[in-house]
Image: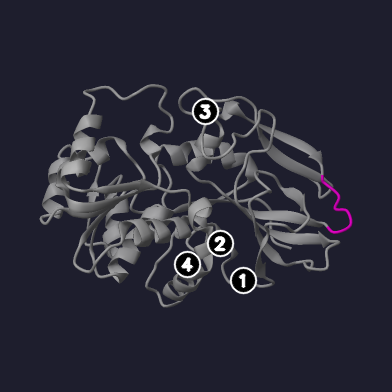
Amino acid sequence: MTDSMNRRIVLASRPTGAPTEQNFRLETVEKPTPQAGEVLLRTIYLSLDPYMRGRMSAAESYAAPVAIDDVMVGGTVCQVEESHNPEFAVGEWVLSYTTGWQSYSVSNGQGLLKLGMNPSHPSYALGVLGMPGFTAYMGLLDIGAPKAGETIVVASATGPVGATVGQIGKIKQCRVVGIAGGEEKCRHAVEVLGFDACIDHKADDFAEQLAKACPKGIDVYYENVGGKVFDAVMPLLNTGARIPVCGLISQYNATSLPDGPDRLSLLAGLILTKRIRMQGFIIFDDYGHRYGEFAKDMSQWVAEGKVQYREQIEQGLENAPSQLIGLLEGKNFGKLVIAVNKPL
């Protein structure tokens, strides 16, 4: 590709069940030209996140779906390559949620978050210092409201949200039990992230191991998985437990209700008798006004080494579809980011 062209990935068709690479199409078009008051953004990093599966579906949700033949949505960290807007300098780094899966885009500057001319870790704005970190921070601290000495359980414990939830829990002096897929991820959660324990959800005796790791029950369950993990958590929930509902990745590719008995009445009964608070949230809709509070705390925790962060950076826009498919299958280890262009 030459600098005169723009590569982009569009939604070619809507998936039924798990997405395939045939649901995406890589196109090469003319690079856009900024007009007066606009800037040309050069995409350096593209974030891949579970919510993107929902945007591929036409089902009603909290945000409009991606239209067929439109560029896939996603957060990006970009550099200003050309500027006709006095608010932005060439070479400046910005966070954008309007660029999506493409090499270049044009913006009038609205909605861009300035990251400075020389940020030390620009891709962190897509993870621990961005939407995933913000999601972990507000979901745990506002809805979960942990108290010192309580037990927090979080699944996807080495993903960008789960890893941050657990580490904030330790900062707040809680017992933190993670759930992850495989021995390597569980070891990382304990040895690097500082969790008190981490249980492999692939183990045959997973539910028994979880119960043993939570001898005093569960006070906060940060929900981002659903499925069999929640089934194991339910009987361990304490009176007054809080459940922030961030995501349900185990169900994103489902085309029908899960097999087995209907447990909705059991959950409703538990919510009543144990006075459980279970609340979903959409991070920027519900907490956008508190981003400054998060940014101040998280920046300090990262700088002090209280929050560790792991990225998985993959090269090439063309690999974004296969990497998203792998993400939905739990194959990533850490925050998944695509390196699209080299920095200026």
Residue 172: x and y in percent read 29, 69
Residue 151: x and y in percent read 20, 59
Colour style of the rendered protein structure: one colour
Nearer to us: label 2 or label 4:
4
Q: Earlier in the sequence, mark 2 or mark 4?
A: 2
Q: Earlier in the sequence, mark 3 or mark 1?
A: 3
What secondary structure is marked by label 1?
A: loop
Q: Earlier in the sequence, mark 3 or mark 2?
A: 3
Mark 4–mark 1 contact, CB under 8 Å?
A: no
Boundaries of the magenta span: 31-37
Name the one closer to the observer, 128 or 313: 128
Q: CA distance from mark 1 to mark 2?
A: 10 Å
Residue placed under numbered mark 1 in the picture: 119
Q: CA distance from mark 3 to mark 1?
A: 38 Å
For this view, does 112 lie left or right of residue 230?
A: right
What secondary structure is marked by label 4?
A: helix
Q: Is residue 110 magenta?
A: no
- Disc 2 marks a residue whose amino acid type is Ala
What secondary structure is marked by label 2?
A: helix
Residue placed under numbered mark 3 in the picture: 59
Q: Residues within 10 Å of mark 1 (few under 14, many from 20)?
A: few
Mark 4–mark 3 contact, CB under 8 Å?
A: no
Residue 326: x and y in percent read 46, 38
In the picture, which quadrant includes the C terminus?
bottom right
User: Residue 125's mark?
Assistant: 2
- Disc 4 marks a residue whose amino acid type is Phe
Residue placed under numbered mark 4 in the picture: 294
Q: CA distance from mark 3 to mark 2?
A: 29 Å
Q: Name the residue: 20% across, 42% down.
A: 272
